[in-house]
Amino acid sequence: MQGYIIRRIIGAVFVVFLVGTFSFFAIRVLPGDFATASLGLDAGSASAENIAQRKADLGLDLPIGEQYANWLWDTVRLDLGTSFLTQNSVWYEIGRSLPYSIELGVLIMIVGFTVAIPVGLISAIFQDKALDYSLRGLAILALAAPVFWTAAIASLVVLQWDLFLIDVIGQPHLWEDPGRAITWYLIPMFAGGFAGTATTMRLLRSQMLEVLRQDYVRTARSKGLTESAVIIRHALRNALLPVLTVMGVTIATIIGSQVILENMFNIPGIGNKVLTSLFARDNPVFQSVVLIIAVFTVLTNLVVDIMYGVIDPRIRLS
């Protein structure tokens, strides 16, 4: 196990390095830069000399190789630099945005998994019954509906019947004002959770149907175990192995995949920060946010792989 974890960590570091390198060059090959864009807002200041001076102040006049070497060395030292746009530390900008993304991500996971697992179980137990067909139809709808469409329809329903106030200005945290925060997050967490339900539910249903046909399940029933004990203690545990991978991927991408929802509801999270920093050509913030997302993703995948061995003792990590 220890050797496996060490190899996975080395691989994870290499993946993060590649993602960081890609983000560094990606934002620089796009047309325009922060110096030109910022001075372009003031026609009287946008002379060639002023633009050159602004680039020199930001380090954008250096050769690309030297910029990359400086970025790499600073990143190794965990120095993410200063935002071009706000002149705040990048760590400060991430620290302000990350709690919002974590809050919304956790709420989306709670909605998605608490719906997907019971629905997948019920659909498998009542295979080919009316309830099964209804739940499968719901899963197909969730799979086909874009998250922005679901969020827009839910917003229209709330506004049409004046169910509650959608406050996109206050931006409270859950620990500051739970009531207002839940109301603010309600539509995006429903839309995100609904979209994430389908894959987990359909996979769990198919795995449960396969497991319920196994010999050891029939043996457990012949021993007189209750149906609930057979399903929970024997069938579900084995059916969850492939589902765990899908859940891990969902968790790993939950922070970086909320760009649409965070921008629709003015949630100043990591997804919002990726988009605003990209449009503003705020290189330090964009590079660092993408790097943070990559670190979270590879660490989550590592934890999922290790949990395989915990859930199923037959698996040996080597």
Image (tube, grey):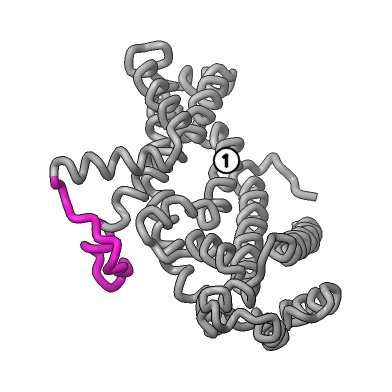
Which residue of the protein is positioned furthest toward the front in this rendering? 44
Provide residue 2's location: percent of width, then percent of height. 76, 61
Q: Is residue 180 magenta?
A: yes
Q: Along the horizontal axis of the image, is 276 left or right of 156? A: right
Residue 212, relative to residue 106: is it above or below?
Answer: above
Provide residue 12's location: percent of width, then percent of height. 74, 60
Magenta segment range? 162-183
Q: Residue visible at 38% across and 53% down?
A: 264
Q: Residue visible at 62% across and 50% down?
A: 304
Q: Which residue is mark 1?
A: 246
Q: Quadrant of the N terminus?
A: bottom right
Q: Residue visible at 30% across and 38% down?
A: 153
At label 1, which amino acid type do we have?
Val
User: Is there any visible trace of residue 244 in the rendered image?
Assistant: yes
Q: Is residue 154 magenta?
A: no
Residue 229, relative to residue 126: is it above or below?
Answer: below
